[in-house]
Amino acid sequence: MNWAKEVALKIIEERPNEEIYTVASGISPSGFVHIGNFREIATPYLVLQELKKLGKKVRYILSFDEFDRFRKVPGNIDPSYEQYIGMPYTEIPSPFTENESYASYMENRFLNELKAMDVEVECIYQAKEYQSGRYNKYIKIAMDNRDKIFHIIDDFRTQDSTEEERKNYYPISIYCPHCKKDTTKILSYCSSTGEVEYSCNCGYRNKLNIENATNVKLQWKVDWPMRWMVEHVTFETGGIDHSASNGSKAVSERVAREIFHYEPPVYIPYNFIGIKGGGAKMSSSTGNVLTITDLLKVYDKNIIWWFYARFDNMHAFDIALDNDVIRYYSEFDRWVKLYFNGNIDDKNKSILDLTNVKEEYLNNPNFSYLATFLPIVHFDVNLLKELLSKENINVHTKEFNQRLELATYWVNNYGADYQVHLLTERNNEYYESLNRLEKEWLDHTKILLNQNYNSTNDLQTALYDVVKDGILVDKELKQVQKRYFQILYNMLLGTDQGPKLGLFLMAIDKEKIKALL
């Protein structure tokens, strides 16, 4: 059983009488949504798939927290955007497009990524919800219970509060109509009328009524539980930074129960995701990000889902862009073959089910072959196809072309260390270290190269046969063949190992090979 099904069963056990199970995610459009943020989507989405398999009706909502304040200029945004700090994202112009807000640019970009990953969600835009007045009565409840809310928050603080803090605490932020920022201070509040008097650092001063205000937002630890109640959320996840024993989640659960009289949703935290060799932790606010768009240039979407499906929510892991890309492709391809051959264990079958892999995936060529031989044939696609067709690979499928595009991008952008380079001069020092028999193997190899082979496997078999004379014991033969291949690699590449020799020798000009041998 995979982890997502375990969570789905836990939800049903704790909420057995739900007519519709509402699964929720939330994203702040503060910057590009990176692959770590995507765990906020992937975790509930995979749980949702298991809930559906268990026969439950499920509603999946994604809240865009676009009415939050702009806190920090990301590293990949013009520093001049510091002037907008304190404004909601919907009031800030897009840094990349015209006639579009910062919020809508980031949201639309992310929605396109979700579409590419086959994720369907019901979007809830929080600026629209707040400004429509939908939440006003709940804002009034929070304001009327501000002392209780302060007491809840205070219970989780490590420092003692002052009477002045308690007196001046209000669970809302007000955006100034003049400067659009939340640099406001509440001067008074009348519970009976709902009237709030406030002033702003820009010099603006005014009154508003909570019951019809459009520029008021609940603070995060009150806003979150309020939305649980409004949307009747039954499951949500959050990063471990929110999930500490004295963190946002703990405070919000008490606010949900004691202020909004709603039982909090079943909740699981998730751990962080890194970039292998990427250094600092990913952050939208710093601009150090790897997005799903970036990932889809290297990985098939089924493999991306596999990453999130195979590791449970609290398992921190790195997604690699270095040579481990080859290993991940090889491992996933192997599991897919086992899956469609019916030779896979139940747990890994349930994980593969979540990737939505189709049988057409078996048409994909070996990623390692593509990444290895593209540079060797100088990115001549026709020559590559001619070569791989001798490996009995069907080069006329859309799957071949799609994977070729991914391999090409990876080689050009991340795979420099993986590329194989033929030696430009004969490795004389290594050659002189060989004994007489080993030198005879090389002479025999040159003779083989004068023949024509219909497939790379035919050439590979002929290479294995070079050292067979007089050796009858399999174990001894394998050791000698290993030594022979090691010699060929050192004479051709200067290394102990390399790509499949039958394929490699067909890809290289025969006269160059003979000269090196």
Image (cartoon, rainbow, N blue to C red):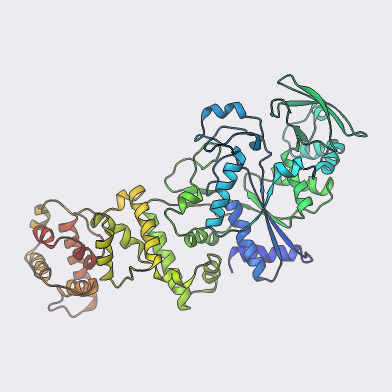
Q: Is residue 315 left or right of residue 468?
A: right
The answer to whether one can see residue 152 in this image is yes
Residue at 19%, 65% in the rendered image: 506
x then y, percent, for residue 256:
79, 48
x then y, percent, for residue 449:
12, 68
Residue at 83%, 47% in the rendered image: 260
Quarter of the figure with residue 56: bottom right
Q: Residue furthest top?
A: 203
Q: Quadrant of the N terminus?
A: bottom right
Q: Residue furthest front?
A: 99
Q: Is residue 347 left or right of residue 412?
A: right
Quarter of the figure with residue 327: bottom left
Residue at 56%, 56% in the rendered image: 115
Front residue of this view, candidates 386 and 513: 386
Q: Quadrant of the C terminus?
A: bottom left
Front residue of this view, candidates 150 and 429: 150
Q: Is residue 372 above or below residue 156?
A: below
The answer to whether one can see residue 37 in this image is no
- Number of on-image labels: 0
x then y, percent, for residue 372:
29, 58
Front residue of this view, candidates 439 and 366: 366
x then y, percent, for residue 498:
25, 60
Front residue of this view, candidates 478 and 260: 260
Q: Is residue 402 above or below residue 78?
A: below
Q: Is residue 109 left or right of residue 248?
A: left
Q: Residue furthest bottom?
A: 472
